[in-house]
Amino acid sequence: MKKLLYVFGAVFLLNVVNVSAFQRMRTDKKRAEDAQKNLKEEEEFLKKNKDAEGVKTTATGLQYLVLKEGEGEIPTATDEVKVNYKGTLIDGTEFDNSYKRGQPAVFPVNRVIAGWTEALQMMKAGSKYKLFIPSKLGYGNLGAGRDIGPNQMLIFEVELLGVEKDKNAGKK
């Protein structure tokens, strides 16, 4: 009887493992399909957007629109910045918003996605830009959390409120 219970237990465990593997394969397949779909949508959007009035494109593919040009200093990669921002996907789905939190974000310029790092180093304090960030300058094939899928392009309105210069710059 014990032997029979062991056999049934082993068969049950194998079935659980197989179901789990099957579900993971389905999830991986869906993720790959989503990644391809998102890249296609990104390509179409950026192609059309590059010709929109006022939109500029950098060598990396970052597109931006100056909504307001500031008069302050321009941060370097090692500076810390204070910003307000709103982040959306191509379809307008909002995934983050410091305005709604009622608190600007503060972080080093070189500790964010590549698209932000590049854009912030073009902005003067007091500026507000709209950024169109290709997935390769964002979260790429990994995506981020539940809201940002693989290869999703990101759109941000970023207001650079201030720059805190790197205190270690020039020290050896």
Image (spheres, rainbow, N blue to C red):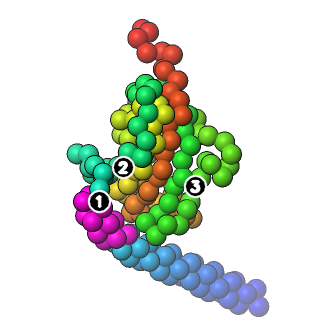
Give yes or no for contact between labels 2 and 1 (Cβ–Cβ under 8 Å).
yes
For the stretch drawn in magenta, the main secondary structure is helix
Q: CA distance from mark 2 to mark 1?
A: 9 Å
- The answer to whether 46 appears left or right of 132 in the picture is left
Label 1, residues with CA under 10 Å away: few <14, some 14-19, many ≥20: few
Element carrying mark 2: strand
Which quadrant of the figure has residue 141?
Answer: bottom left
Label 3, residues with CA under 10 Å away: few <14, some 14-19, many ≥20: some
Span colored in magenta: 38-51
Q: CA distance from mark 3 to mark 2?
A: 20 Å
Examine the rendered structure and indicate whether residue 54 appears above or below residue 23.
above
Q: Is residue 50 magenta?
A: yes
Badge nearest the viewer, 3 or 2: 2
- The label shown at residue 96 is 3
- The label shown at residue 65 is 2
Element carrying mark 3: strand
**Amino acid found under the numbered disc labelled 2:** Leu
**Amino acid found under the numbered disc labelled 3:** Asp
Examine the rendered structure and indicate whether residue 53 appears above or below residue 98.
below
Badge nearest the viewer, 1 or 3: 1
- At 61% across and 48% down in the image, what residue appears? 98
User: Which of the two residues, 21 or 71, is positioned nearer the viewer here?
Assistant: 71
Examine the rendered structure and indicate whether residue 4 appears above or below residue 59.
below
Outermost residue to the top: 172
- At 36% across and 49% down in the image, what residue appears? 65
Q: CA distance from mark 1 to mark 3?
A: 25 Å
| Image x and y of residue 5, in percent | 73, 87
